[in-house]
Every structure is written in structure tokens, then in C-alpha cells.
Image: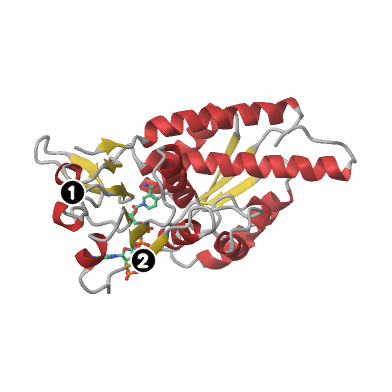
Amino acid sequence: MARIISGTAISGTLRAEIAARAEALRAEGTVPGLAVILVGGDPASTVYVRRKEEACEAVGIEGRTLRLPESINRDELFGVIDGLNADPTVHGILVQLPLPDGLPYKAVLERIHPAKDVDGFHPLNVGRAFIADSRGFVPATPAGIMELLKREQIPTHGRHVVIVGRSLIVSKPLASLLMAPGPNATVTLTHRHTVDLASHTRMADILIVAVGKPGLITADMVKPGATVIDVGVNRIDDEGTGGTRIVGDVDFDAVSEVASAITPVPGGVGPMTITMLLRNTVDAAERSARRRASMQGKPSTTQ
Ligand code: NAP
């Protein structure tokens, strides 16, 4: 029976570390600040934004949500972002996706100053993650998965990691983090057009699934003893209660009999994602404090 990797427990430890860093910043006169832009009233986005606000408050980050009407145009939205870019009390900016149709999300993400782009979606930060340049920001979900592997002491060095999915938000940055010097994994990326997916997944020492299809990965697709990280979030009908419930992409019960370690859904990768956003925000605030201190010729005590 596989060991359960609890993202909830690891997040708790990490959030305590983040809160201590936020406290140290406050003691130096910098209140870490995150601005979240929510355009329109998409129900799922509204819930995600509220969770981010609550998480910020719990670790001592000043979270501010700008709720903008769906009718806002590109230039008005750029104006809001420019204002936040120039605001010294804001260290991190994120635009909750998806944006309403008609707003060019790539141009909007590029408008955020790279030093405040705590989602890591600006092309400069995408490139920095690719070349393992620590001045950038790594998107929260892949950063959270790397942290899970590290804190659970799951070796990646020389191991074969198979990732199902090739998105820019999760899989591609994760592949570059895993194959970088340090983690030193051998990485295979698969996608919708991969022929005989199971022949790839069965080779994995670590199988990471980020697709959005419940039950995609069955027990016969997993090598005995593998570590399985399930990123998928799917709402399905719950026959027991007549309501709905959240599941991942992996047939959890059956795969748990084959794998050596597995993340549950919910309670695995999900909690890590918000935690890494908080960490990126504190990183941004510390970098800003260091820049200010060096301009004033003073040493900063925060890391
Ligand atoms: P995405 O952009 O929709 O990408 C899905 C990927 O899965 C695509 O690369 C697609 O291939 C691939 N795919 C689809 N069907 C496949 C199949 N039958 N076999 C192999 N590959 C297949 O999704 P995403 O943003 O990466 O998110 C993936 C899942 O993770 C979703 O359920 C999402 O809700 C969840 N998620 C969770 C968190 C969290 O914090 N827990 C964070 C982000 C995302 P093509 O490129 O060929 O179409």
C-alpha cells in the first residue's frame, strides 16, 4: 500500500516558514503585499481568489483584490497593472485566469513587471525558469511539486520522470526544473498525441499527471514501486451522496496498491500551489527590500 504524500501537512510546515519571513520583513518596515486582479465574476475564479486572500492573511502578507468589471477594455486593464507596477507597497501582482473573452491574456501577463510576476508567467520568468536562473519566479504548481519531492526525500537524480501533459502552467516548467543540474532527472513529456501512453507511464520511477481527465491513469499503467503525483482536479458526480466531489486524474484506490507513494486529491498538490504563491510573494518582497537597502547603502537582514 502506497505511502500518502500529504500536501496539506507539508504546506503547513512551509507556511510557518513563510510567516516567519513575512514577520522579519515587517520588523524591517516592509509589509509584503500581493495584488490580485479579478476581471468579471467567474464563480470558480471568485473562490480561488478568496482562498488566496485568506492564505495571505494567515501568513502576514497584505492581500489586496482588485475586482474589475467584465466590460473593462485592454487599455484600462493595462492602466491598472501599470499603477500596481509603480506602487512600492505591492511586491507581487497576479491576474486570475481565465480572463473574459476579448482580453488578450498573453499581452496582459507581459504587462506585469517581471520583478512582481509572482505567478511566473511573464516570458522573462518563463525563460529564467528554463535556464535555472534563480532571479526569476517559478510558477506555483511546478514549484510545489518540486518541494513535495524534496521534503518527502524522493530521489530524482538519474531517475526517469514521466509527465503526462505539456501545459505551460504545470508540465513544461516542471520538466525544466527536474532536468536541471541538481535534480538531474531524465524527463519524458507526453500529451494527447503520444502513441501508447501506457508504454511510457510504465517506465516511470516518478509519474506526474497533469491532464484533467478522471481515471486516466489506471493501476496497469504504473510501475510497481513508482511515486505518483496527481495534479488533476476534476469535479465528478458522487453517486453515494447524489452531490459532487473532487478527484484527480489517477485511479487512486487501485494505483495505491501498486505505487510506493502517491498524492491524494484533494490534499496533495493543491494546497502546495497557493503556498508556493505565498513563498514567491515573500521572495519578491525580500528582493525589493534588498534593492531599497542597497540603494540607501544599508545592509538588509532578511535572506
Ligand atoms: P491543460 O493546459 O488543459 O493541459 C492538459 C494537458 O493534458 C495537455 O498537454 C493535453 O495534451 C494533455 N492531455 C489531454 N488528454 C490527454 C490524454 N488522453 N493523454 C495524454 N495527455 C493528454 O491543463 P493544465 O493547466 O496543465 O492542468 C491539468 C490539470 O491539472 C487540470 O485538471 C487542472 O485543473 C489541474 N491543475 C491543478 C493545479 C493544482 O494546484 N492542483 C494547478 C494547475 C492545474 P495536448 O497538449 O496535446 O492537448
Splitting the image into 4 quarters, where does residue 218 fall? bottom left
- Name the amino acid, label 1: Asp
Q: Seen from this angle, which residue lies furthest right?
A: 297
Query: Residue at the spot x=60%, y=33% of the render?
Result: 61
Q: Residues within 10 Å of mark 2 (few under 14, many from 20)?
A: some
Nearest the viewer among 262 and 173 is: 262
User: Between tags 2 and 1, which lies in front?
Assistant: 2
Describe the element under mark 1 as helix, strand or loop.
Answer: loop
Q: Secondary structure at mark 2?
A: strand
**Which residue occupies the foreground of this view, 159 or 278?**
159
Mark 2 sits on what residue?
189
Say if mark 2 contacts mark 1, CB within 8 Å: no
Residue found at the very far left of the displayed protein: 239
Q: Residues within 10 Å of mark 1 (few under 14, many from 20)?
A: some
Q: How is the image coloured?
A: secondary structure
Which mark identifies residue 251? 1
Q: Work out whether residue 149 or residue 209 is closer to the camera in this orientation and state it.
A: 149
Residue shown at 43% from the left, 33% from the top: 10
Examine the rendered structure and indicate whether residue 228 appears above or below residue 194: above
Q: Quadrant of residue 263?
A: top left
